[in-house]
Image (tube, rainbow, N blue to C red):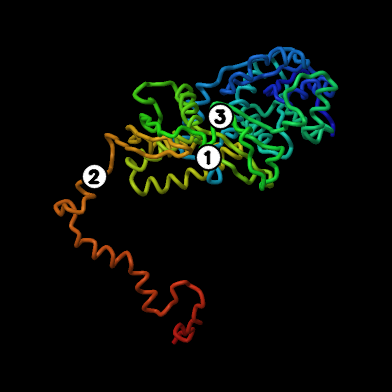
Amino acid sequence: MIKPTVQKVVLAYSGGLDTSVIVPWLKENYGCEVVCFTADVGQGEELASLEAKALASGASQLIVRDLREEFARDYLFRLLRAGAIYERKYLLGTSIARPLIAKHQVEVAHQVGADAVAHGATGKGNDQVRFELTYMALDPRLKVIAPWREWDIRSREDAIAYAQKHNVPIKASLKSIFSRDGNLWHLSHEGGPLEDPWNEPEEEMFQLSVSPQNAPDQPERIEIGFESGTPVSLNGQRLSPATMIEHLNRLGGKHGIGRADLVENRLVGMKSRGVYETPGGTILLAAHRELEALTLDKETLHFKDLVALKYAELVYNGQWFSPLREALDAFVDSTQGPVTGEVRLKLYKGNILVAGRKSPFSLYREDFATFGQEDVYNQTDAQGFIRLFGLPLKVRALNGLPVSGLDMPQPDYSRFKRD
């Protein structure tokens, strides 16, 4: 493969094993200046000593941007309003962060006059697609370097050996070799013993949540307020988006909420196993669903569930900056006006129990639902409705067709002969 000529590259830098060894590798193989870019999306203390580490690895500088509020407001809460979950369990914590990081990486490349961008995603994973689709959408002129698709390193063990040879400070070891990705929304765990789906995750692996067995023996009540589908308050106190998630992460983690163990279908065609901790997001999703159930009409609610599946697929596949995602957001936004009110929940040993919900735009009418009132609902009207609703079933039975649809009789084509 012919390498492009690169003068300066901006590397999406986490300070983890992969991106740490990429810095000296880029300098050796491309002879270019390396600028490291780190997005603060809520990984917290991992950023403390990052600059010294990047410079020690050979970078000319480290640029850090605090994106926590933007991440929560413009990405996570959009995800929440859409109700998007990938393959029934995954709340898309890693997937949703990548387009935001790549967007700012492109901006930094413009800022420092770089002609290339680089990432540490492997050639087997989804992140390479998420990063590069964003680069293409925002500035296709930038050259893209993906070391995992070029170098001879083929495992985390190889990467550790390379780092040790080049005196790059790293945390990973051969004994503890989980691949983790953390941000404001979640913490993911992959690799090591998790690569065998039969292996149960060890309790020591979890970092955001206690096990449900060790959670408090008494439930904790909380109340979340929403305005047009967006969470705005916790227990009566208005909070910024990022602060809201941080508070709920602590509460959810304390009660063992938000763990998911999933064998998922990667975009590149293989299955992989990941274990996710998303305590705050799990609570918010449960509350949002309860309020939607109270305020959205049947047809809108049911169709929105279909939209949520496609929305999740687009996010997982890295198509955040796509016309379809923008169009789906327009639909979601149009549904969220009445999703305003409060939801009361009880957190208890890994469970989220609904204790109440209310909204000024509630479509629930007690006088309609009660079995005792006849002035708002004439029960005899149901007879005609049932006759029409069941007419296709009646016709099928009158024609002698089996209920299951199997063992169908041969049709009598003589009935359809022309005269």
First along the sequence among labels 1 and 2: 1
Query: Of tags 2 and 3, which is closer to the observer?
Result: 3
SS for callout 3: loop
Residue 224 percent location from the top left of the image: 37, 30
Say if mark 2 contacts mark 3, CB within 8 Å: no
Identify the amino acid type marked 1: Leu
Q: Determine which residue is flagged by label 2.
A: 365
Residue 237 percent location from the top left of the image: 36, 21
Total label count? Answer: 3
Q: Determine which residue is flagged by label 1.
A: 324
Identify the amino acid type marked 2: Arg
Q: Determine which residue is flagged by label 3.
A: 208
Label 3 neighbour load within 10 Å: few <14, some 14-19, many 20+: many
Horizontal side, residue 159 vs residue 315: left or right? right
Identify the amino acid type marked 3: Leu
Say if mark 3 contacts mark 1, CB within 8 Å: no
Image height of 5 relative to 209, above or below: above
Horizontal side, residue 280 vs residue 162: left or right? left
Residue 126 image label: none
Label 1 neighbour load within 10 Å: few <14, some 14-19, many 20+: some
SS for callout 1: helix
Quadrant occupied by the N terminus: top right
Report the front residue among 361 and 417.
Answer: 361
